[in-house]
Image (spheres, helix red, strand yellow):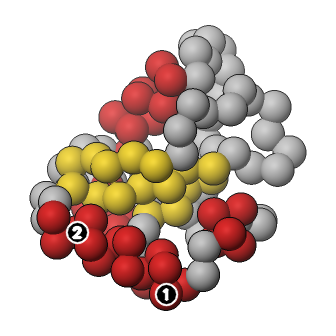
Amino acid sequence: MKWVYKEENPFEKRRAEGEKIRRKYPDRIPVIVEKAPKSRLRDLDKKKYLVPSDLTVGQFYFLIRKRIHLRPEDALFFFVNNVIPQTMTTMGQLYQVWFIYYLLLLYY
């Protein structure tokens, strides 16, 4: 999958932005959410989020579902490095595993 954010922002810029955010908000996780190229879901009004590290992936699903006005019968999946994270995983745990990007990148 192609990341528009990664293509538009070189690694050094992403790293600096992620480090700055983590210094200022150590208990928060910077998250970038992008729509997958073939997704038929609505666009999000924003793609950058700053979430509590103890927020679960399931709670984040709920937050995003509300933002795109998704019906209960419609499916929503997040991918982190082509893997669907478990809903009980916290955003902090995901960040620890995938922090090499300095910002947690999710596809929906």
38 on left or right of 60? right
Of residue 18 and residue 88, the one placed in the foreground of this image is 18
Q: Is residue 21 above or below residue 34?
A: below
Residue 107 coordinates in the image, percent (x, y):
62, 52
Q: Residue shown at 22%/69% (left/top)? A: 22
Q: Is residue 15 above or below residue 94?
A: below
Q: In this view, does 69 lie above or below 12?
A: above
The residue that label 2 is drawn on is 22
Q: Residue shown at 68%/32% (left/top)? A: 43
Residue 7 coordinates in the image, percent (x, y):
71, 73
Judged from the image, the secondary structure of the residue bearing numbered disc 2 is: helix
Answer with the quarter of the image where residue 16 lies.
Answer: bottom left
- Mark 1 and mark 2 lie on one chain; the one further toward the N terminus is 1
- Answer yes or no: is residue 48 visible: yes
96 on left or right of 82? left
Answer with the quarter of the image where residue 60 lies.
Answer: top left
Alpha-carbon distance for marks 1 and 2? 15 Å
Q: Residue shown at 44%/64% (left/top)? A: 104
83 on left or right of 61? right
The residue that label 1 is drawn on is 12
The quadrant in which the C terminus is found is top right
Q: Which amino acid does label 2 sit on?
A: Arg
Judged from the image, the secondary structure of the residue bearing numbered disc 1 is: helix
Do the numbered discs 1 and 2 sit on residues whose CB atoms are within 8 Å? no
- Answer yes or no: is residue 101 visible: no
Of residue 22 and residue 99, the one placed in the foreground of this image is 22
Q: Residue shown at 38%/72% (left/top)? A: 17
Is label 1 or label 2 in front? Answer: 1
29 on left or right of 64? left
Tally of marks: 2
Q: What residue type is labelled 1?
A: Glu
The quadrant in which the N terminus is found is bottom right
